[in-house]
Amino acid sequence: MELPEECWESIFSFLEHHRYFEPLSLVCKRFLSISNHLRRTLTVTGATLESLPNLLLRFPNLTTIVFRDFHGNLDSVLSLISQSGLRLKSLDVSSHKCFPLLGLKHVASKMKNLIELNCSNIGSLKDSDLIEIGNCFPSLQVIDISYPDHGSGFSPNGSLDSKSFSGLITDYGILGLASSLKSLRKIDLSGNTFITDQALVILSSNCLFLSEIGIRDCDFITQNGIALAIRKSDNLKSIFMNGIGIPSIDACFLDSFAYARSLSELDLSNSFISDELLCLVAEANVPLQKLVLSRCFCFTFDGIYFLLSKYPSLTYLDLEGATFLNDESMIELSKFLCNLTFINLSSCSKLTNSTLFYLMGNCPLLTIINMDRTNLGVEPFSPEIVVNPRVKALRLGWNNNMNDECLKMVSYVCPNLEALNVTYCPGITEEGLLQILKNCLQVRCLEISKCQGVKNLELHFELPKLEVLQAEGLAIDDETLASIGKRCGRLSRLNLEGCLNVTARGVEGVIVNCKVLKEMNLRWCNNVSLDIVAWMVLSRPSLRKVTLPCVSVPSANQKDFFLRHGCLVCQG
C-alpha cells in the first residue's frame, strides 16, 4: 500500500536539517519532489551563483535566503530573486562590502511578507539606508544592523576620510526606521558607536511590541538610556549589553529591573557588576530563563548564589571567567540548576573533573557544557558517576591536563554525544578519542585540532554519523586519512590545515569515499600539489569549497573553471 503525499511530508519534516533531504532525494522522483517542496532555506555562495536560477525553480517554498562568502553583484542577484515568485520571510545580506539598496527595492516591490532582515557587518551602512529599509519593508519584525563596517571610511591614522566616507548610523536614522516599523520586535544595534540614549527612547516610544534589544559596544548609550528603555518597553524580554559599571553602576539602572516584568534573557557580558545588582535582579522576580555574565568582574559567590536561588527555572547560564568558582562552590550552585540545558564555565580555572561529572549527574536536562581553559584532568573521578543520555555537546578545549582517562569516562557518561571539542589538549591521544568514537555512536562533529599527542587515528570501525572533522596540525598520514575516508561516508567538512604528512594519495582516499564532502581545507599541506584540484572538483560534485596549500596559486582561469563546477577554490 502506497502512503499518500501528506504522510511522507510529515515523516520528512521530522528531519532536523535540510541536508538530510539530499540522500532521500536520490531514492526516487517522488522523494525528490517532496524534499524539494519541504526545503525552506537556501544559502547562496559564489559557488552556487551560476545554478541559482535553477535552484529557485527547484525549491518553490523557500522562505529564507542567506548570502555567505558571496562577492558578486548583490543587487543583480536580489533582483533575480525578486522575480522568482517566492514568499520570502527572511533575508540575510550580512558581511557584504556595500549596502544593496537597489536590490532590496526590487525585493520589496515583489515580496511583501518579509519580516526578518540581517544587514550586520555591511560596508558603509548609513542613516539614509535605514530610512529606505523602513519604507521598503514596513512589516519587518526583526532587523540586525550591528557592527557596520566603516573601515574604508577611515584614514590610516584613524580619522575620518572625507573622500571615501559615506556616512554613519545616528539617532536620526533610528528615528526614520522606527517610525515605519510599527511591528518591530527585535533589533540589534551593537557596534553603532554614534547612536545615543535618544535612539532607545525613539525605539521604545515607536515600537510598542519591542521584545529584544542588542546594544553591545555602543559607546554613547548610557545606563540612564538603558534604564529608560527597560521602564518604557512593557514587552521587553531580552536585552544584551556590555561595559556596564564603568566607572560605577548608576542608581537608575539598578532600580530599572523592578519594571522589567517580562524580562527572560539578560546579557551583561564584560561588565563590572556587583552583588547588589544581582540581588536586585533576583528580587525583581522576572521570568528569567537566560543569564549571561561572561567575563564580568566585581561580583562574588554570594551574589550569584542568591540570584540562582531565586530562579530555579533558569535554562541557560554563562559564567565564563568567574575565577572565584571552585568545585565546592559549583556543587552548591547546582542545587538550583535542575532545569539547566546550557552552561558555560570556560576560563573558570579552578574547576576540575569533579564539576564536569557532578553537573552531568545532577542536572538531568543539560545538553551543552562548555569548560574550555579549566583544570580538567587533575582530580580523580568520583565513584558515583551517573550516565546522562541528554548531553549532546561538550567543549573541553585548551585543557593542558586533559587525558585519555577523562575521555573514556565521558564516553561512558554521555552515550548520545554528538559534538566534542578538545582542541589544544596535548595530553590526549588516539586511545581516548577511539574510545569516544566507539561508545558514542551519534558523534557528528569532532574537533581535535592541535592535539599533539594524537599521532595515528587509524579507524577500524564505521562512523556513519560523523560529518565534521577538524584535525588541524595533527601528525596524521595518508594511511590514517585513507581509513577516515573509508569509515566516514557522511563526512561533509574536513580541516587538514597544517597536516604536513598528508599527500595527494591520502586526499584521493577521502575524495573517492566521502560522497557528500562539501569543504576541505589543505592550507599548509605543502605535499599536496595544485595538479590534483581539478580531479577533486570533477570527481566529487558535492564539493563547494577547497582551500589550497599556501604554495599553490590557482590562476584566474582555473578559479573560474572550478566555480563553474560549483566549487570555490581559495588560496591558502
Image (cartoon, rainbow, N blue to C red):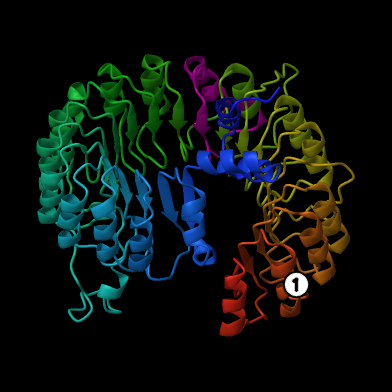
Vertical position of residue 91 compared to residue 361: above or below: below
Q: As rendered, which of 179 and 245 lies closer to the eye?
A: 179
Q: Report the residue at 15% width, 32% height from top.
A: 208
Q: Nearer the viewer, residue 343 or 19?
A: 19
Does residue 126 show up magenta in the picture? Answer: no
Q: Position of residue 322 (x, y in %)?
A: 46, 36
Residue 425, horizontal then vertical, whole percent: 69, 48
Res 160 → quadrant:
bottom left
Q: Is residue 290 left or right of residue 517?
A: left
Q: Is residue 197 visible?
A: no
Quarter of the picture containing the N terminus is top right
**Image height check: is 286 above or below 61?**
above
Q: Which residue is mark 1?
A: 535
Question: Which residue appears farthest toward the front when viewing the image?
Answer: 1
Count of numbered labels shown in the rendering: 1
> Could you tell me which quadrant the C terminus lies in?
bottom right
Along the horizontal axis of the image, is 108 left or right of 24? left
Find residue 216 and report its horizontal and vertical position in percent. 29, 47
Whether residue 342 appears in magenta in the rendering, the answer is yes
Q: Give the camera-side residue of 148 and 75.
A: 75
Q: Is residue 55 visible?
A: yes
Image quadrant where residue 455 sits: bottom right
Name the residue located 68 percent from the left edge and 25 percent from the top edge.
2
Q: Residue at x 17, y 23 (%)?
A: 259
For the point 58% across and 72% down, which residue is it? 564
Rendered location of residue 278, percent (x, y)? 31, 26
Region rendered in magenta:
327-355
What kind of element bears circle 1? helix
Badge 1: residue crowd in 10 Å (few <14, some 14–19, many ≥20): few
In the image, what residue type sits under mark 1?
Answer: Trp
